[in-house]
Image: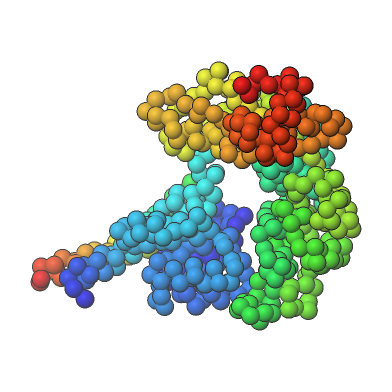
Amino acid sequence: MLNVLLVDDDSEFSDVVCHIVEFLGHNINTAANLAEAEQWFENNTFDHVFLDFMLPDGSGLHLLEHLKKIGQSPRVTLISGHPSVKGKLAEMCEANVGHLVKPLQREDIERVLNPKKASDKKKSAPSIKRHFGTLIGESEVMKKLYTMIERVAATSANVMLMGESGAGKEVVAQAIHNATECDGPLVATNCGAFSKELIGSELFGHEKGAFTGAIARKEGVFEQAAGGTLFLDEVTEMPIDMQPNLLRVLESKKVTRVGGTKEQAVNCRVISATNRTLTDLAQNNVIREDIYFRLAVFPIDIPPLRERKEDIPLLANAFLEQLNEENGTDFKWQASQLKELEAHDWPGNVRELRHAIHRAFIMSDPKGTAIVLPESLESPFSKVNKETQNNQVMAGQTIEEVEKELIHATLDKVQGNKTIAAQMLGISTKTLYNRLNAYGGIGEYK
Amino acid sequence: MNNDESLRKLVHDARAPLNRISMNAELVKLVLENDMPKQKALDALDKIIANCQQCSEQLQLISDTHASE
């Protein structure tokens, strides 16, 4: 169920839209002009705003500016009476702003309020099973993950998701939220994206006038996620001196807005995520121990893609199916291409796989059905990571092994030029030749 | 206001009753499809009739304005 605001000066139109939106199972409020709309936002948040382009006291675009100022970002559908404005609106519109042209139909409203449901009606049922509506994979490690999600969903315990970048932490958070079948929403925020000054307001909200620029009261994410799930991504990137405030909320289950005095009860599950390892957390003092134990009541490790390679064909098919549906194409994988994808290591995990498939999709001829994979599947990041990993010194290596690796890496860097390599290594050319003779690798650099 | 702008404004104003007609017709469909109270559909149909009249007047205004230019 969504909270919807309709801003339109045509009261008869507003009345009938209210009937239809309520019938679709959502809450709706109306405003006849910009001033009324701004008033609604003083004490409320909305998931979706239908906004007439031309209002008695200004353009609908003024409300968009106002929403930016007060830090609210509901999905907005601009309604215009001029088909000619449609193109201009499309250029101006940001990702969360859509547009419709009058006269409207019920399907338009249904589609923008529930894009997934509306498009599902037109599509054939997807052939790949999505566990908890989101997760794809039938490997043993994923089955273990599904069991953990089922178990934790039956409780209200806080969950900490750990996994490499791109492994799908936000998707797992969505899966836990779906499996919980709670009434409230899933609210996601990235703790690494806010400055020390702003993170308090983002998490706990603020009262009007709490600080310069706080022109209206704002609900924090804890309040927004009431009855649902709060997803704190990159929680370990939160400034350490802000962590005691978070701990207080987690312990007391009460939140006080910045500049406020009244405590609000918090009743949401907190799912946090980090791409740091447990050792990293312990060694580098990025998260306080007391907060860790509050957040990681139930820690879940998300397996990297290389540990579930048998899921790659399923994922590749699901991504291609989605791209075909979005673009009206009919590309298909060949068995050899799926084998090629399966053979790759995907250090950037599912995100990298999805990106590579999207790139291949764009490069392929839309009139045909054959998808063309690039010659190399490696991304610039995976190349650099591999080089860094290759050059790492590991405990347990002998000095001789490290010296040999260093000499080879230096020679590779200077295309086998032994004089320059010797200078870089701080040894004479003769010594370099002697070492290469001893290691039996001189033939490679002749 | 030049002629083009004036025409655009008149067309815009004619689209408002059309928009109400469209949404009221959708409401009638909803009522019939979901066995809702009949009175809701009758009210919506009255509104459709009134808005058709309004739309007609608006189109006449466009026609008159266009003829006088």
Q: Position of residue A91 (x, y in %)?
A: 39, 57
**Which quadrant of the view contains residue A251?**
bottom right
Q: Is residue B21 visible?
A: no
Quarter placement of the N terminus of chain A: bottom right
Residue appearing at x 29%, y 68% in the figure: B13
* Residue A40 x, y percent position in the rendering: 57, 73
Q: Is residue A170 left or right of residue A160?
A: left
Can residue A406 be seen at all in this image of the molecule? yes
Q: Is residue A320 above or below residue A20?
A: above
Q: Please state the horizontal and vertical placement of residue A335, each as a whole percent of the image.
A: 56, 18
Quarter of the image with the C terminus of chain A in it:
top right
Q: Position of residue A311 (x, y in %)?
A: 67, 27
- As displayed, is residue A152 above or below residue A196? above
Residue plotted at (68% across, 35% down): A422
The answer to whether A368 appears left or right of A178 in the picture is left
Q: Residue furthest left?
A: B68
Task: Report which quarter residue A440 is drawn in.
Answer: top right
